[in-house]
Image: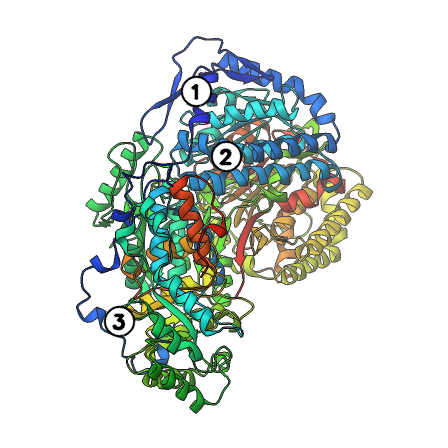
Amino acid sequence: MSERDLKNTNVTAIAPRASTRPPAHGAEDLRNPGVPLELDWIDEIRVNRSAAERRIDSLAGRRTVKKDWQAAWLLKAISLMDLTTLAGDDTEGRVRRLCAKARQPVRTDLLDALGARDLDVKAAAVCVYHAFVRTAVDALEGSGVEIAAVSTGFPAGHSPFETRLAEIGASVAAGATEIDIVVSRRHVLKADWRALYDEVAAFRKACGPAHLKAIIATGELGSIGKVGKASMTAMMAGADFIKTSTGMESVNATLPVSLIMMRMIREYHARTGFKIGFKPAGGIAEAKTALAYLILLKEELGADWMTPKLFRFGASRLLGDIERQLEHHATGRYSAANRHPMG
Amino acid sequence: MEYGPAPEEHGYVLEWLAAHKFGFKLFINGEWVAPRVKAEPIVSYNPATGETLALIARASPGDVDAAVAAAKAAFPDWSARSGHARARCLYALARLVQKNSRFLAVLETLDNGKPIRETRDIDIPLVARHFYHHAGWAQLRDEEFPDHEPLGVVGQIIPWNFPLLMLAWKIAPAIAAGNCVVLKPAEFTSLSALYFAELCREAGVPPGVVNIITGEGDTGEALVRHPDVAKIAFTGSTEVGRLIRRATAGSGKKVSLELGGKSPFIIFEDADLDGAVEGLIDAIWFNQGQVCCAGSRLLVEESVAESIYDRIRRRLSAFRVGDPLDKAVDMGAVVDPVQRARIDQLVKCSKSEGGIVWTPDIAMPGRGCFYPPTLITGVGTGNVAMREEIFGPVLTAMSFRTLKEAVELANNTTYGLAATIWTENVNRALEAASQMKAGVVWINMTNGFDAACGFGGYRESGFGREGGREGFIDYLKLRREWGAASIAGKVAPSGAIAPVEGVDESPKNYIGGKQKRPDGGRTRPVFDHRGALAGRVGLGNRKDVRDAVEAAFKAEDWSRASGHARAQILYFIAENLSKRALEFADRLCTLAGGTKAGARAQVELSISRLFSYAAWADKYDGLAHSPPQRNIVMAVNEPIGVMGVICPDAPPLLSFVSLWAPALAMGNRVVVVPSETCPLIATDFYQVLETSDLPGGVLNIVTGERDALTKTLAEHDQVDAIWYHGDASGSRKVEEASATNLKQTWVNDGRARDWRAARTGEGREFLRRATQVKNIWLPYGD
């Protein structure tokens, strides 16, 4: 179906498959155990919103990826995706369909046209409510796709503390390999960092081997400085990932807020040697937005972070747009949504 | 995961060059005209590749004559048009710039070497914004600037670092006000100006209103020296600015100069440190550092200095330098190998003086004129990289301990263009901003520009503003400001002696709040209006002027006092003068002649004038701008500093009061040379001052020979401005001498002023001349 000669494509060269990466080793690649709460680290945080916005505006003109590079980056974006369904009308069938899409996110003929079949592109994880963890575990068996559950009274986090801990335990027991927890926004709003730290530390303990992604709910914190402080507290408490949003707030992931969270990750890494992952979520629906996030990631944290171990997109609609862009790259024609299998 | 190439298409721009057969003529009177004298054309080339773009004509003095003549001929019609008619032309230009924005961005990048990101996202949008904004000033001129008129033909000379933007900053206000212009772009970067000439035709700008002549320094010099040019507006080096100041001295031309800088960039420990590092990227690694207001001197609080240096090194290690047409580079090419060699030489010199030079390990292009981003640490304040404007991508850094020290280091320069301050503490930010000796202060941001916000320097960074109200008025003048009559001739001594009534007096100088005997121990005779010897005053010399300037310099508290406090003193002076009104009137009659009623009127008018400036002291407020970015920009009217004021001979009391009172009201400290023929009125005034709580040093009075004292004042590097009322030759000498430290001058060119009329004897023009505008940018958001 490709009308273009893609024999010379270097997509594969630009986006090496995840499995060809050198094995992780060294102290830096150990899982973050958390550190005792250091209130000084929080007090020292200074964030200037206008400066953050200017960095984002400026970066949009400083970096771009075109042609083969763009295709390679978009394939990379797919491999960093937590395909998500978090709706009241979710069913087992719906979740199974999503899992199938996670295993096989791009049409094989399209991958062939791009010369990217060898990349073995798949989503990083599927993200569901606890009720569907079992379904996802079955559907994804042997795929290498992780199973993430939103536990802890998602999205508001107001259910009893013991209930939230039990929810984590249940999800892990059901086979979830990652738990996306929500923090109590009231602790952040009241600047009660001790309470926030204790909460996340308890969640982390409850997670056991499963990785903990702490949702900061940045749109509900009222100040970009609080985003930085909540991020730092969550990392000290042992979060493996920090995540922007539930997707349910009026303002979800934004680039300026992501910039601040990435800088906090860099700061934490400089202080402790542990690398924390970042997950923007909510409202990321277009391929070009995804590229902007990846560019920001590369610039602020470096190419080391461009791996599923350290970066995820929380997204439900993003994949569809990426598929259309990839087809455009392969054919030179703009594509249509109905040409790509639904997730 | 790498970025790959992302080239901007540019073939259509080359087609335009081809349509001009890769060669350009001069744009005079709306036509393309070949130069009158056949000369080797200037080769315009792309600094990123070294490839030739086009050949540029060299305008000879004869071509300059033709361009000025065309502008002069167009002036009567253009200036007589309604503001609305001019506004339509400027609006059309703004629209045309927008419609051709990508073309202009690509052309500018090809010619200059700066990244397409900058021309596309910064330069060209600001060009359009400038024409929009000034279409507005054209529309509103008569209402907002009553009693003002345009100057005539304006000569404008612009640099190569922002070719089209500097053109816009020059042409938009000039033609909006009703002037006609002859503009010379820089020889390295004339192409966008030539394209703009085509847009002028399309916009319906009448022939002769805008003339573009290309050439090198000699073309510029012919323009500067042209007798039919009413004003020279120049942006460029301080060195050339001085030449222009000297060349125009005594010509009556208005001059505005936007010159060099070595602007401080201050980071306090409570700043958003990563944000501040991004600010540095915008400060010194913007346009390859070829920016007059570049934050090239980093001053960082010692507690975070190493952390900042580490962050800079990490950030620059991800820098991309390369083809400026690539949409994914941070920095493009330096404009010319000459410039690169100069940068390199200064960096080597800094290194030899102990500077630690660091550059990141990043890929640099194999060909073209590129220079890597560079950080220099380990320097003292005397290091060449701390003092000299490098005009390249080189940051020099040192630490400080306290706000006070940061301010001292920041102001420890001959320049004063811009300053940047990073802190999350608004108290600290505004305290530091108020103390910066700079025309633009950016808080938690840098290199922000907007047509509504004036831009221009303090000290040797030049004078005059571009943008805003303060920039627009530089292209206007007050109607009938000066009388044609020259200063009255001196009275010849008759040999008679007017007997002293009462006890003999020994008038001295008034320095630092005390009466001081003249340093040379000499006096000079003073004659009354009939030529009779009326007494003796001190014959002040260089050292008296030196002491007076020193006293004025030390009285800096006056500049920080509130307008209310200054008003109280001026009212008190008026009150005390009023108590002695009869005595002063008698003295005026005796010394200067005239009727008793006339003398009484002069004293009463002097009291009224003191009231006027006491009134103004807390009312000549600045403005708060809201540029398109989320910002408040405070345009603050600040005192200039230490001023020298040379009074005319007559009317001795009224002109004396009329000159220093506005200067004091605005917070300046002044050294006055009173009427040469009638100085006893000023020496009598000491007692008024001494009883009025005026702090010592705020007003200093030195009597003696006008031109001798003026020379010392005009040459004094601690004097920031000088107002001169004497003869034409004295005016010329003041302007010439002022070039050394580029002090602001206001001279009468031998003309007289009506001091009695409120229209010419007092008011806003005096206040404007006694102040300089500082624009403080403060972005907000949490």
The circle on residue B218 is: 1
For the residues labelled 3 and 1, the Cα–Cα distance comes to 63 Å
Contact (Cβ within 8 Å) of mark 2 with mark 3: no
Q: Secondary structure at mark 2?
A: helix
Answer yes or no: are tags 2 and 3 on the same subunit.
Answer: no
Residue kind at label 2, given as amino acid type: Arg
Crowdedness near tag 2: few (<14), some (14–19) or many (≥20) residues, C-alpha within 10 Å: many
Viewer-proximal residue, B400 or B174? B174
Q: How many marks?
A: 3
> Would residue A286 be found to the left or right of residue A210 on screen?
right
The circle on residue B102 is: 2
Residue B355: horizontal and vertical position, in percent?
Answer: 23, 50
Viewer-proximal residue, B484 or A188? A188
For the residues labelled 1 and 2, the Cα–Cα distance comes to 33 Å
Q: Secondary structure at mark 3?
A: loop
Q: Chain of mark 2?
A: B
The circle on residue B467 is: none
Crowdedness near tag 1: few (<14), some (14–19) or many (≥20) residues, C-alpha within 10 Å: few
- Vertical relation: B454 (above or below) B551: above
Quarter where residue A150 is shown: bottom left
> Would residue A200 be found to the left or right of residue B103 on screen?
left
For the residues labelled 2 and 3, the Cα–Cα distance comes to 45 Å
- Vertical relation: A151 (above or below) B544: below
Answer yes or no: are tags 1 and 2 on the same subunit.
Answer: yes
Residue at 70% across, 59% down: B571
Q: Chain of mark 1?
A: B
| Residue of label 3 | A274
Quarter where residue B67 is shown: top right
Q: Nearer the viewer, mark 1 or mark 2?
A: 2
